[in-house]
Amino acid sequence: MTTASRFRNAPLLACALLGTLDAAHAAPTVSRLTPPSELFASGNAAPVIARFLPGQRFDLQATLRPDEAGKSITEAHFAIDGKPVKATVALKSCSSGCLPAVPTNASIATVRAVSAMAQGVHTVSVSATQSDGQTVTAQGNFEVIPLLAGGQKVKNIIIMLGDGMGAAQRTGARIVAGGYAQGKVVAPLAMDSFPVTGMVKTASLNSVVTDSSPGMTSYVSGNKNNNNEEGVFPDDTVDPFDNPRVEYLSEYLHRTQGKALGLVTTADVFDATPAGNAVHTSNRGAGTGIVDQYLDDRGLTGLTVLMGGGRKWFVPSTTPGSARGDKSDYQFSATDAHTAEIVKRWGAAAGQLDKERDLLADFQAAGFQYASDKSTLDALDLNKTERLLGLFAHSNMNVALDKIDGRRSKARGITGRVVDDYGFPDQPMLDEMTAKALKVLERQKKGFVLMVEGASIDKQAHNMDTERWLLDTIEFDRAIKLTQEFARTHGDTLVIVTADHECSGAALIGGSRVTDARLQELVREGGGTSLRDKVVGIYEQAGFPKYKIAADGYPETTDIDYRLLVAYGANSDRYEDFRSNPLPLQDSQQPFVKKEPLSVYPSNPLARDADGKYLVTGQVPGDSAVHTATDIPLSAYGPGAWSFTGVQDNTDVFFKLAQAANGVVLPEGLAGAVKQAQRKR
Ligand SMILES: [Zn+2]
């Protein structure tokens, strides 16, 4: 008898305690009940963890453990508010395919794609019987958030997601791109001109510090996921594609309103943020299955535009540089109800282990126009383009600093720059991709959901490569400006600008006290901490760093005299020389990273900037700065923007977006004030 395992189920603790006194009282136990709830985990009815829209679909699941080896679970039933759920319960045996901690005679019971309509808190219960006839019942809860009637229906929703973009990243971009004069900003960022701003609490289901997967999915599913998981709740199986699902905003609005989905990113398109709008998996790294799902489940999501990097997932495994493989793919069994019900109830594709698939050709066969670089993107007749796929790099695209350097160098007849090393000298900027996406999506009669990600604000903050994330934030703001203009001319469009989490604990500590020429001398002298003491200007010594902005919208150089200085509160060990890094750090996602010329790029923050001998000891292990739990800003523009004020949970954002799509209603207090004002007139 495994007494210990029975203690996992807190609501049954009393029973389990009795059980230790009286073996005859033994019974099966429920060690997990999904959707996640505190009622199940701790016995507390609040806070309610899982929340859904009326009719929003999600899976019910329970892990059921017999009390002794040799027994098995024979039956399981779910009920919502005491009423039996009328759908097939798939009972999967853990004789194979479950996590090592789960006994092999356990079973996992699942009902796919259920929903509830009535607003308020509901109880969900599971009852199971084991082979000797003994039974167990466990209870959890979830809440249905009502959609209020009335008001203008927002047709288009644009989510501008600056990955890792905390307050410091926003301020830094403003100082560099906008400049300050006697304390006033000369040219504000587009995102600074949004009328409403709030703060967002970013925790995931299993940590105060989220990664990008649950960071994104909280905004577009209304629910917390575990780190590394997207569009699913955690489970006890090893298959990363069979987890209990929750319906995305894209899926809900495509199913109920016929809206299309657009995804634009500077990352590899398989990355967590874009995938966290359309793909259901507990492994954000399962790239082959993730990109297959984009195409195969487009009938669920309405996917119409997909742009970014990541060509390595779209070409057959025999093509050099391909990353397709069976290990990162999935295939649901038609004979196993556990996964077959995903196909039946959700209408999802069954998947296939098809590493030789030519996904580029399949996208094109499905009506997507394909652009491989900026020139082919510009050459497309977008008035005749119904669907658009753009893949501009093997994996993550180059960052703004390197793309701009490539363009300026090319204009001067210089090659051999970073974009040339990567083999993609003609990549579009994020605002250029966004303009094309809007052109295709604006013809969608029922509207669209567009997510645009400035991905390398995060990636370069991890690398503590200050100038690279600063310029990526400027690039991101240029894309924001376009969406704001679109919303201005299309009054039925809501734009939100936010991040999934802060990255690196970035802090704007001041400005350099020396010219760049003097800084180079001091670095050559290798003074260590005395380099810091001679360079770092704090308070009024910082003054107002002045960057000259070129016609292309980016600084002429980032190595100015008396430059802006950034420090990191969540850093790994690194050297700092306060100057721009000529080369980015190696990107392990690039298929040819171990070959020249990419293999000569610095491999980690200790492999660069060592000349000045100024070592900054890290607070975190490893060789990368980490995400922090700090709240992040959210700015909103357009009808429904007001609802984003205040300090809100990341999952609140989903319900506000869905409400806007259903009708922009004023909050009670405000509605009352408006009525009063109207009466006075
Ligand atoms: Zn990150």
Image: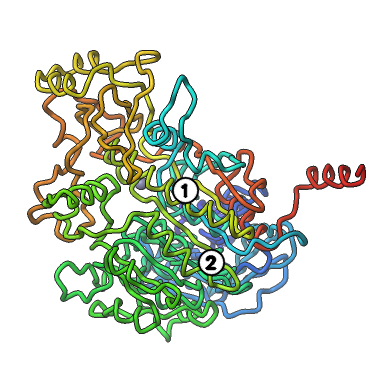
Disc 1/disc 2 C-alpha distance (Å): 24 Å
Q: Nearer the viewer, residue 558 or 217?
A: 558
Counting from the top left corner in percent of width and height, residue 33 is at 55, 61
Q: How many marks?
A: 2
In the rendered view, tell whether residue 26 sits above or below residue 643.
below
Q: Which residue does the image show at 16% across and 34% down from the upper left?
A: 606
Would you identify the image quadrant in which residue 462 lies?
Answer: top left
Numbered circle sitting on residue 250: 2
158 with respect to 380 (left or right):
right
Residue 415's mark? Answer: none
Picture coordinates of residue 169, whole percent (x, y) = 40, 36
Task: Please state the horizontal and vertical placement of residue 163, each as a whole percent of the image.
Answer: 41, 47
In this image, 46 relative to 677: left or right? left
Between 545 and 671, the one lying in front of the other is 545
Residue 605 appears in the figure? yes
- Secondary structure, mark 2, is helix
Label 1 sits on residue = 206
Residue density around tag 2, few if under 14, some if 14–19, many if 20 or more, within 10 Å: many
Q: Is residue 531 left or right of residue 93?
A: left
Q: Secondary structure at mark 1?
A: loop
Badge nearest the viewer, 1 or 2: 2
Against 534, is 639 above or below? below
- The quarter of the image holding the C terminus is top right
Residue 148 drawn above or below residue 548: below
Is the CB–ligand 1 distance for label 1 below 8 Å?
A: no
Q: Amino acid at mark 1?
A: Asn
